[in-house]
Image: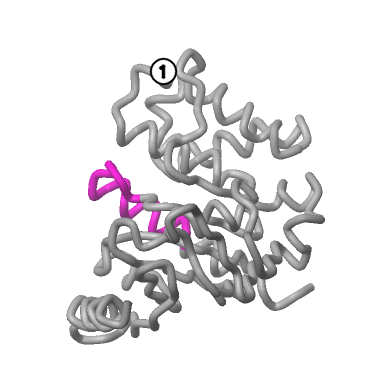
């Protein structure tokens, strides 16, 4: 078993006009929560799409759970849990059915799906919405349902893009605790966010992206993490 659940080496993805990400080196070790922070348009979403195979890099190497991403097959992807942009849920299906379907898509044996679904419903306090069609849920509860689908099978690699969007304080705390439990059990977790105070509560490492490049790291225990963040971003933008 490799030390890293995710490893990017000299990864670039360029678009017409020059936007994209350039020469990215980034890793997520097993058992850690690595936060990726940056301003809007910094390249976070492009980078995370590369990590889950939604985009192909122009150059560089990406490894997921020890496999080159181009060679990763369904058994590897079944050990990944991801939520990027919008929750993958079906509006006409209720919460419980959506979770059963997510488990099936990840190859979870049928005998394990029921207990697994009920466990995540309890963990994220979604039981009251289990029989409600997803299209009737609030934005925040749809987000929670999408997170439940990404976390319920206890993946070895978890990739979440702005997971606390639309969540109320209670849901944020439950998600925080769920991620800490999974990291303690050995999962590698990458979370992107623009909420510096929130990621500092759970992150082992914090990396800063600006103008499509990694520009430095932040100390999660730092006294003035916001000032340090803007100093890194300002210096990076001044150099471009």
Residue 81 visible: yes
Give the total number of marks visible in the rendering.
1
Q: Residue at x 70, y 39 (%)?
A: 106
- 56 relative to 24, above or below: above
- 30 relative to 106, above or below: below
Q: Give coordinates of residue 187: x percent, y percent.
A: 61, 64
At mark 1, the secondary structure is loop
Crowding at dot 1, Cα within 10 Å, few <14 / some 14-19 / many 20+, comes out as some
- 221 relative to 200, above or below: below
Q: Give coordinates of residue 229: x percent, y percent.
A: 26, 77
Q: Residue at x 20, y 76 (%)?
A: 226
Residue holding disc 1: 132
Q: Residue at x 43, y 56 (%)?
A: 17
Q: Classify residue 195 as left or right of residue 4.
A: left
Residue farthest top in this picture: 92
- 127 relative to 218, above or below: above
- Is 160 inside the magenta-drawn segment? no
Is residue 118 or residue 158 the one in the foreground?
158
Q: Residue at x 71, y 66 (%)?
A: 63
Residue 173's quadrant in the figure? bottom left
**For the magenta stretch, what is the residue range?**
164-179
Q: Give coordinates of residue 8: x percent, y percent.
A: 62, 71
Q: Classify residue 78 as left or right of residue 17.
A: right
- Is 177 inside the magenta-drawn segment? yes
Is residue 67 or residue 129 the one in the foreground?
67
Q: Give coordinates of residue 18: x percent, y percent.
A: 44, 61
Is residue 50 or residue 110 the one in the foreground?
50
Colour scheme of the rendered structure: one colour
């Amino acid at each position: 078993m490799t030390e890293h659940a995710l490893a990017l080496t000299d990864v670039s993805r360029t678009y017409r006009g020059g936007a994209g990400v350039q020469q990215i080196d980034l890793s997520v070790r097993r058992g850690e929560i690595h936060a990726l922070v940056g301003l809007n348009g910094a390249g976070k979403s492009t980078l995370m799409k590369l990590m889950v195979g939604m985009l192909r890099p122009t150059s560089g190497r990406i490894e997921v759970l020890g496999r080159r991403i181009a060679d990763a097959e369904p058994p590897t992807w079944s050990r990944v849990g991801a939520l990027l942009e919008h929750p993958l849920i079906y509006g006409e299906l209720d919460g419980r059915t959506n979770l059963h379907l997510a488990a099936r898509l990840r190859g979870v044996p049928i005998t394990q799906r029921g207990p697994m679904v009920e466990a995540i419903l309890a963990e994220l306090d979604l039981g009251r919405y289990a029989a409600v069609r997803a299209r009737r849920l609030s934005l925040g509860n749809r987000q929670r349902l999408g997170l439940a689908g990404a976390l319920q099978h206890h993946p070895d690699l978890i990739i979440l893009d702005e997971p606390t969007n639309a969540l109320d304080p209670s849901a944020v705390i439950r998600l925080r605790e769920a991620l800490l439990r999974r990291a303690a059990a050995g999962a590698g977790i990458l979370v992107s966010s623009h909420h510096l105070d929130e990621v500092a509560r759970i992150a082992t490492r914090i990396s800063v992206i600006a103008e499509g490049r990694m520009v430095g790291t932040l100390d999660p225990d730092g006294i003035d993490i916001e000032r340090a963040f803007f100093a890194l971003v300002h210096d990076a933008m001044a150099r471009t």
